[in-house]
Image (cartoon, rainbow, N blue to C red):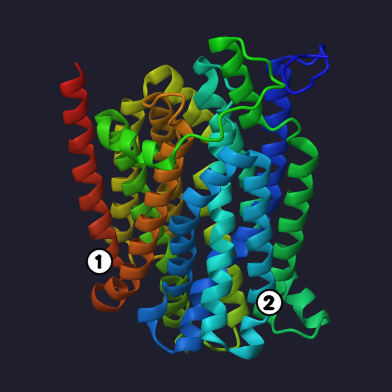
């Protein structure tokens, strides 16, 4: 037997990494189905129940707050019990959220909507942590590629999720539930399947394996001896404060998430208005289900932009450089904003803008996450990654919470102008950081 984690001698670290990537990819695919409906339906439910567009971002706000509050606990759980336990815990809570969302339309309960969306947000935090799990055993020269592969895997499920609104509605009617409840039945099944995949595939746990490997390489301690309990999360926060480059990488990722969530979360409401204008009727007219299908399609294209090309962007970041990729992301963010500014009343322009928004987020997140992983010590890597995800959650909460107010005051175009300003400011920051580094 291998001295590390009791592995058979024929299984190498490289083979284990491939199995980890396959397992993480499968779980991302399945959980993506679970998350897709919440993005497409959540904001519409919030407006329907509250009666005000100012609350359009409430569900996304709850999801983002959950990401901010659960990222560090999930990172701490990963350090203590391994990636498998942390990820399955996140997906289990998300499954409870999907169950709760099934009963939001029939009860018209705004508190239930917020609680259920919050639990779904814990699943989103687990999805974010999965990208870092891909780097636990990755070779340095392939870190961006492996991270990108796991991010890519969510594409199929996440793109399918919003497009399952119509089949989900049929399932809901079969179960005696409203149309908007049905998609969350599919979400629940997806989350449960993801939990099963992780429990079967992440054995041995990649993070625990990497910790033992590092220990044997540094001091020759046998894997049967007790490992240090965990690195302190406070140490990770201190490392983030002390290392300017790590802080820079996290900042780029956080601003990308702020921009993406703010614009994306308001898109269903804007598209609903466009449909009502074109039909000359109310947004709640009999064609409302057709509008939901259109919204689901647009959101699915946006999600495809977020994940479909992430392996390519990972390889680009490996070969072209992290910071050059970050600059490219800001250029794509700017192009996305200009599409809305120049064609705010065009459904096609909004669709193109959402695809570009997803691509920009993907480039920034993949290159920025790889940059963060390389800018910290081995001991503080997981806690700093947890802090990165926490700050992403805070940014998402701020973006979704304020976006509803911006939409109600300045319209969808106002959101685009703010996104354009953020992209310009971040691009200047990246270029000045490159200048200091050289």
What number is the disc on residue 414?
1
Closer to us: 77 or 311: 77
Where 68 falls versus 322 (above or below)? below
**Looking at the image, is mark 2 or mark 1 earlier in the sequence?**
2
Closer to us: 410 or 93: 93
Residue 269 percent across, percent down from the top left: 44, 74
Q: Measuring 32% from the left and 59% from the top, which residue is drawn there?
A: 340
Q: Measuring 53% from the left and 79% from the top, which residue is drawn there?
A: 45
Left or right placement of residue 88 versus residue 113 in this view: right
**Which residue carries the number 2 mark?**
102
Closer to us: 438 or 40: 438
Where 427 falls versus 215 (above or below)? below
Residue 43 percent across, percent down from the top left: 48, 73
Closer to us: 379 or 345: 379
Q: Considering the numbered disc 2 on the image, is that residue within a helix, a strand or a loop?
A: helix
Q: Nearer the viewer, mark 2 or mark 1?
A: 2
Which quarter of the image is occupied by the N terminus?
Answer: top right
Q: Measuring 39% from the left and 31% from the top, which residue is drawn there?
A: 372
Left or right placement of residue 92 versus residue 139 in this view: right
Where 218 falls versus 136 (above or below)? above
């Amino acid at each position: 037997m291998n001295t590390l984690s009791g592995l058979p001698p024929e299984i190498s670290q490289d083979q284990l990494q491939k199995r980890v990537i396959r397992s993480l990819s499968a779980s991302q695919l399945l959980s993506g189905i679970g998350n897709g409906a919440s993005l497409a339906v959540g904001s519409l439910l919030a407006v329907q129940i509250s009666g005000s567009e100012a609350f359009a971002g409430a569900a996304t706000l709850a999801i983002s707050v959950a990401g901010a509050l659960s990222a560090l606990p999930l990172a701490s759980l990963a350090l203590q019990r391994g990636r498998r336990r942390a990820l399955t815990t996140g997906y289990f809570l998300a499954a409870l959220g999907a169950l709760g969302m099934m009963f939001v339309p029939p009860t018209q309960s705004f508190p239930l909507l917020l609680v259920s969306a919050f639990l779904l947000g814990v699943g989103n935090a687990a999805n974010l942590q999965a990208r870092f799990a891909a780097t636990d055993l990755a070779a340095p020269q392939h870190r961006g590629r492996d991270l990108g592969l796991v991010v890519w895997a969510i594409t199929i499920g996440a793109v399918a999720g919003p497009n399952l609104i119509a089949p989900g509605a049929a399932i809901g009617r079969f179960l005696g539930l409203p149309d908007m409840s049905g998609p969350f039945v599919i979400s629940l099944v997806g989350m449960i399947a993801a939990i099963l995949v992780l429990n079967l595939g992440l054995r041995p746990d990649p993070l625990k394996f990497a910790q033992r490997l590092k220990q044997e390489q540094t001091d020759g301690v046998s894997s049967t001896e007790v490992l240090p309990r965990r690195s302190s999360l406070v140490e990770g926060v201190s490392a983030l404060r002390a290392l300017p480059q790590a802080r820079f990488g996290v900042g780029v990722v956080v601003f990308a998430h702020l921009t993406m969530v703010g614009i994306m979360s308001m898109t269903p409401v804007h598209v609903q208005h466009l449909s009502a204008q074109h039909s000359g009727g109310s947004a709640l007219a009999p064609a409302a289900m057709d509008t939901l299908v259109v919204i689901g399609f647009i959101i699915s294209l946006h999600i495809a932009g977020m994940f479909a090309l992430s392996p390519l962007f990972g390889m680009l970041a490996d070969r072209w450089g992290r910071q050059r990729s970050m600059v490219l992301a800001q250029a794509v963010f700017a192009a996305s904003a200009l599409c809305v500014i120049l064609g705010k009343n065009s459904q096609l322009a909004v669709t193109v803008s959402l695809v570009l928004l997803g691509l920009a987020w993907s480039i920034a997140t993949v290159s920025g996450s790889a940059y963060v992983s390389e800018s910290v010590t081995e001991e503080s890597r997981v806690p700093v990654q947890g802090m990165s995800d926490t700050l992403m959650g805070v940014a998402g909460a701020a973006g979704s919470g304020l976006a509803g107010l911006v939409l109600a005051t300045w319209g969808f175009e106002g959101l685009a102008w703010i996104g354009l300003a953020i992209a310009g400011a971040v691009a200047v920051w990246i270029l000045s950081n490159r200048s200091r580094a050289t």
